[in-house]
Image (cartoon, helix red, strand yellow):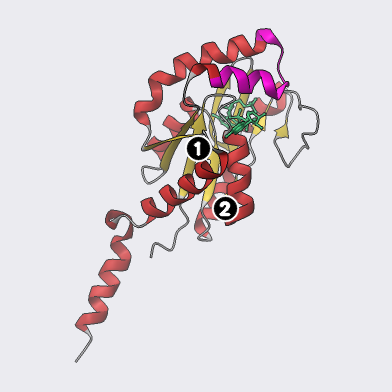
Amino acid sequence: MNKKGQLIVISGFSGAGKGTVVKQLVERYGYSLSVSATTRAPRPGEVDGQDYYFKTEAEFRNLIDYNGLIEWAQYVDNFYGTPRKFVEDEIAAGRDVILEIEVQGAAIIKKQYPDAMLLFITTKDVATLRERLMGRGSETEEQVAKRIRRAAEESGMIDNYDYIVINDDLDTCISTVHSVIMGGKCKRERNEEFIRKLQDDFREEP
Ligand code: ADP
Ligand code: 5GP
């Protein structure tokens, strides 16, 4: 099959549960996960270099200037971006890499890497989204309201995605996302090189 790793973009409304899902995908199935750079302040328990590379705005701008990010975007009040080297090295080494990024970044990735698989994770409705955001307890009520407004805008961008998965029961969502990725990787057009080799192999048969 395809020797290069698969680039997988996972987006979803803030609070839909994509962080929870992605963490389990990494633990259960061994996906490689890109750690983003951000100017956002760490939440309690978040570790620099593990959850994000926490940067000042000047440091972030420097990363942009030196072409260190494959995409970046402003989300609510902060900047977020994907470090280039890790992603390129992992794909070249044949590992499947997940980027957990928002919709503007996902659109940039699709332009730069047309083979990337774009998945959108959502709650079944807005009420559940609000409940999860409030339940997480990491944002103030005003920040939750901002994130819901942003989610409303993002809902118009779902058309850019290849797949949509509802995060209702967590375990079902995790295994569905994994199955979708595996299914996507088996698409014939993603495996042209393998097919040609297989056909050559038959040609060499006596
Ligand atoms: P995101 O990364 O999309 O912003 P999180 O992964 O932080 O979302 O999840 C938001 C909140 O919802 C967290 O408190 C998380 O534990 C909870 N959560 C995630 N998935 C589910 C689910 N399937 N059912 C109930 N709660 C969930
Ligand atoms: P949070 O502050 O909740 O960790 O993340 C806010 C939003 O930024 C989420 O939608 C998350 O997916 C997105 N995000 C995280 N890292 C990146 C990145 O590197 N690039 C882009 N474009 N978005 C990101």
Indicate if the residue with disc 1 has its beta carbon within 8 Å of ligand 2: yes
Question: Is residue 123 rendered to the left or right of residue 183?
Answer: right
* Quarter holding ligand 2: top right
Q: Do tag 1 and tag 2 residues touch (Cβ < 8 Å)?
A: no
Relative image position of residue 164 (x, y in whole percent): 40, 35
| Residue assigned mark 1 | 10
Q: Residues within 10 Å of mark 2 (few under 14, many from 20)?
A: some
Depth check: give the residue in front, 89 or 14: 14
Label drawn at residue 31:
2
Q: Earlier in the sequence, mark 1 or mark 2?
A: 1
- Which quarter of the picture shows residue 49? top right
| Separation of marks 1 and 2 at Cα, in angstroms | 12 Å
Q: Main secondary structure of the magenta part?
A: helix
> What element does badge 1 sit on?
strand
> Residue 167: percent from the left, percent from the top?
51, 34
Question: In this picture, is 88 found above or below 104?
Answer: below
* Residue 200 is covered by the magenta coloring: no
In the picture as drawn, the residue positioned furthest to the top comes out as: 142
Q: Where, quadrant-wise, is the C terminus in this rendering?
A: bottom left
Amino acid type of the residue that numbered disc 2 sits on in the rendered structure: Tyr
Q: Is residue 68 visible?
A: no
As drawn, is 58 to the left or to the right of 151? right
State the extent of the magenta-drawn residues as a range: 128-142
32 relative to 167, above or below: below
Which of these two is toward me, 151 or 204?
151
